[in-house]
Amino acid sequence: MSDMTSLPPSQMLTDLSIENVAVVYDDKSIIEGIDFQLSAGQIGCLLGPSGCGKSTLLRAIAGFEQIATGSIALDAQTLSEPGFVVNPENRNIGMVFQDVALFPHLTISQNIEFGIQSWNKSDRQERTRHLLSLVGLSGYEQRYPDSLSGGQQQRIALARAIAPKPKLLLMDEPFSGLDAKLREELVPDVRAILLAEKMSAILVSHDQMEAFAMADQIAVMSEGQIHQLASAYQIYHKPATRFVASFIGHGDLLPSKVCGPNCVVSDLGEITGQTDHGFSADQEIDLLIRPDDILHDDDSEFTGEIVSKWFRGSHFLYRVRLASGKVVYCFASSHHDHSIGQSIGLSVNLDHLVLFPRDA
Amino acid sequence: MNKAKSMPFLRPNWLLLISVLVALLLALPVMVILTNVLTGQANVWQHLIDTVLADYISSSLILMLGVGAGSLLLGVPTAWLTSVCRFPGHKWLAWALLLPLAVPAYIIAYTYTGLLDFAGPVQSLIRDLTGLSYGEYWFFEVRSLAGAIVMLSLVLYPYVYLMARAAFLEQSANTLEVSRSLGYSHTRSFFKLALPLARPAIVAGVTLALMETLADYGTVKYFGVTSFTTGIMRTFNGFGDAAAASQLASVLLLFVTFLILMERYSRRRISYHSSGIRKASNRKIELTRQQGILAACVCFLPVLFGFIVPALQLLYWAIFSAQSIDAAFFKLAWNSLYLAALAALIAVLLALVLAYASRLNKRPTVQASVTVAGLGYALPGTIIAIGIIIPFAWLDHQIIAWVKQAFEVRLGLILSGTLFALLFAYTVRFMAVSLGAVQSGLGKITPSLDAAGRSLGYKPLDVLRKIHVPLLKSSVLTALLIVFVDVLKELPATLILRPFNFNTLAVRAFELASDERLADAAPASLMIVLVGLAPVILLSRSIGSVKTH
């Protein structure tokens, strides 16, 4: 189901290569048929609701879970195969944990130096000094973890994980324990730090805004499978499956009927895309409509009744009931203040049609 | 969803095997008692019912009722005053109120007997002052059921105090301020809000005190009160009737089971009742000068009578019987110390094995085994001892008979009447204590700490050495200390299971006191109390106002 074919061939040369991986507990597959690639220096994200298997995949990459099928390889070196596991300590893969997991009995500098004991002392100190300034916590060397705030602890956890210069950094929901404001501050910082260190990384998240802000490549996961692997722009505008369409952003599926090679007809009239959609004539299909695809237009012949509304400052977001009873989102500029129950004219502004065949 | 899962290749099945084995072994005494009930002869039952059973049940019930009331009376008001109010000495009293925990009930019992009986200083003083002589005045008879209730309450109220104090501290000041703002006075807030909120914790504390009451042998024996423990001992030692003794033990077990269930139930309710905000409030009620003095007195009385008076009396006697501290005394002390140290080591080692088994293997079998292994804490030493001596004696007879037949050699006792049996009993009784300490320490080492160590290049054994050992050290030391002190104080199981001619401080103190040689018993008792202070100090530090670091 992955969307690999849409990637240009040059990006197929990857550092991390996961092929057809499955993890099984007690005869039950937690993840299955996983294909995933990440190029050197890129940041990837495993995005999905809780229980979709994203953490299991991450732990398989880290070497904490054995795989039942397929292979995991880094820099052309096989790390995991059925019955074969390179131990976590020998993988050269760093990890940042949801609960931070700093060693409470060690100082900040001892925590950061934990993974680079084999380095000589001056190199160690230099690395620690460099990392502390990178994460903005110079001068905290002798403090203990519990004297730091949540955000500071997570920065130290990041510094500790990247201190040994791992080939790949894994981050398991690293921001989920932080409040919204701190998260907004930390996410771009972390991306900047990873770019500065030229570090490949994979982030596990259930928060799409976090994924959009961090990742070059996003794998949207559900029920143990990857539905789509693509850039944030692609998964928003060209979702590969119904699940991706509904999980990413706001959107509604509008029942429609094919009326031409690049055209469908729905409650909102005939809509024509720029490219052929490949469905046969008169086929019943669903059209993905985002809030920004429907505009308030007094001149339009199509109308809908306002069900609810939110004032968002720069614009209004309306829920509008169409003639067929289907309810969709609609953006309107902030001086178009209508009350609930009122009918407003609607027009569609779409040039790429996202269509899914109707379920049987 | 799988964050809690541990590394599959660190999940060997031998952990399962070991934990099941340990659990079965530790459950042996109870299983022996229970099978004796099921296979016991009906006529023994009938005999027990006809003669002593009603007596045992009624006096044990009165004892429980009395100690329950007494420990509530001493524990709850002091807990509330020290946690919510500010008065002269409130900080000092908050930990001093724990001191009676260091005094075993049988020691306080004979100390007060010495103080209050006819020849004691108190009655002598009354006679001197009033000119009355024997029989012409009424005086409280310490050696009675009522006396036992007072003695046990004086040393067991700290269980209630500890639990209630924790509950009161956890109630946020906001809750009380809300109630004030709704027009409730301090007093009404206490009865309408603070007390009901703390009730599950208080009930849990009372059940702990009652378990100790049921387990007590020294006090009731010394005071001549008929209870289950004295009855079991009498049946077993006096009549050598193991079947009747174990059937009596099974009735006692019924009482204990009821208390365990009650304790479990109230502990579950504690979590419902806590607000989730665990920050202890430092906003306290300022008492007026008179109220403050009254509060200080209320809090000082239990300390005075539960610790200071008996400790001073023991010290006085010990000084006057200092010549009795001879080689025999040091032998006694050495016996006690190495026995306690050995038992502590065994209990903590097994606790470590069980705690790691339950961490690494989440199977229900392992979890159930760990629970079973910890059940002994509620069992009176007498039950455990009877449950051990019956199978051990049987095994010994089998082995001796077999060896005699096969090799024509006469063997002595191998299991029963040896230190092995004694250490086994201690392990059963105090496993829960060490398990609790070790598990709470291990619980703070989250699985992701392990994973972090691994991903930073450390092998499992190095993770154990560099992360687990330093983080677990203090909990393991705590566990060692608590088991050590508990073993030192233990009386009934030691009395039943000790090898011939083998004495400990506790046994010797009890024997001397029973022979009315109270002063001679003082050095051993004083030593037990002093060693017993160590875990109390540890405890008082952990309940201290705000934790640093």
Image (cartoon, coloured by chain):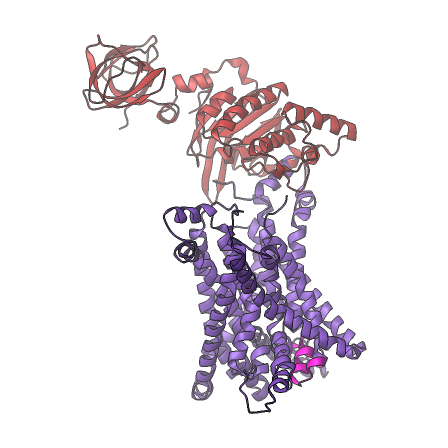
Chain colours: A red, B purple
Q: Where in the figure is residue A23, as x and y percent of width and height?
A: 50, 37
Q: Where in the figure is residue B38, as x and y percent of width and height?
A: 45, 77
Any magenta on residue A16?
no
Any magenta on residue B504?
yes
Nearest the camera: A136 or B120?
A: B120
Q: Quadrant of the C terminus of chain B?
A: top right
The residue range painted magenta reads B497-519
Nearest the camera: A119 or B287?
A: B287
Q: Is residue B308 above or below residue B293?
A: below
Residue shown at 56% from the left, 81% from the top: B142
Q: Where in the figure is residue A183, as x and y percent of width and height?
A: 51, 27
The answer to whether any part of residue B349 appears in the image is no
For the image, the number of numbered tags is 0
Horizontally, is B169 left or right of A251 in the view?
A: right
The answer to whether any part of residue B314 appears in the image is yes
Horizontally, is A28 left or right of B457 in the view?
A: left
Horizontally, is A92 left or right of A341 in the view?
A: right
Q: Is residue A140 above or below residue A292?
A: below
Horizontally, is B467 left or right of B319 in the view?
A: left
